[in-house]
Image (cartoon, rainbow, N blue to C red):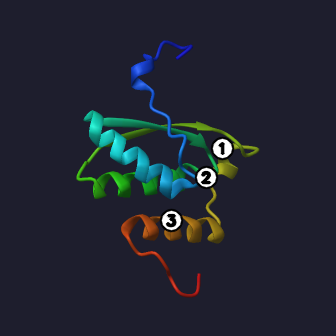
Amino acid sequence: MEKGISPEKVHMDDQAKDTFENATYSSMRLKEIGAENVTLITSASHIRRGLSVFKEATLNEGMDLEFTNLVYLDYDSVEEAQKVSQSEHLVVYRDLMRTSGIWAYPGI
């Protein structure tokens, strides 16, 4: 808002305890306000999971939104941030399956 973004365009979730809940609560709110696009703001270590889960959650609400993002670089370099570890893949898949309605995946 200090950079000129109108306060009525900023919607914060203060209820969620994790990415799944944030995407679920936010998607319901986005539907209420008739959003057409979203800018997801998070860290580089969270952006892949955040975007995946938010896209799924909004599709679950019947919306096909345009997503952009603003990322804080919490790695030593952009090259380091672009690497995706096996554990990150598993966390993204876990949260994406949870958002899709698959609550438990044996073996993970």
Residue at image coords 54%, 14%: 3
Residue at image coords 36%, 47%: 27
- Check whether the beta carbons of the residues at disc 2 and disc 3 lie within 8 A of each other: no
| Distance CA(mark 2)–CA(mark 1) | 6 Å
- The type of residue carrying mark 1 is Val
Q: Which mark is residue 9?
A: none
| Distance CA(mark 3)–CA(mark 1) | 24 Å
- The type of residue carrying mark 2 is Gln
- The type of residue carrying mark 3 is Asp
- Check whether the beta carbons of the residues at disc 2 and disc 1 lie within 8 A of each other: yes
Mark 3: secondary structure:
helix
Label 1 sits on residue? 78
Q: In the displayed structure, does residue 19 sit left or right of residue 57? A: right
Q: Residue 18: percent from the left, percent from the top? A: 57, 55
Mark 1: secondary structure:
helix
Q: Residue 105: percent from the left, percent from the top? A: 50, 82
Q: What is the quadrant of residue 6 in the picture?
A: top left
Can I make out residue 36 in this image?
A: no
Q: Residue 89: percent from the left, percent from the top? A: 57, 68
Label 3 sits on residue? 95
Q: Residues within 10 Å of mark 3 (few under 14, many from 20)?
A: many
Query: Of the residues under marks 3 and 1, which one precedes in the sequence?
Result: 1
Label 2 sits on residue? 82
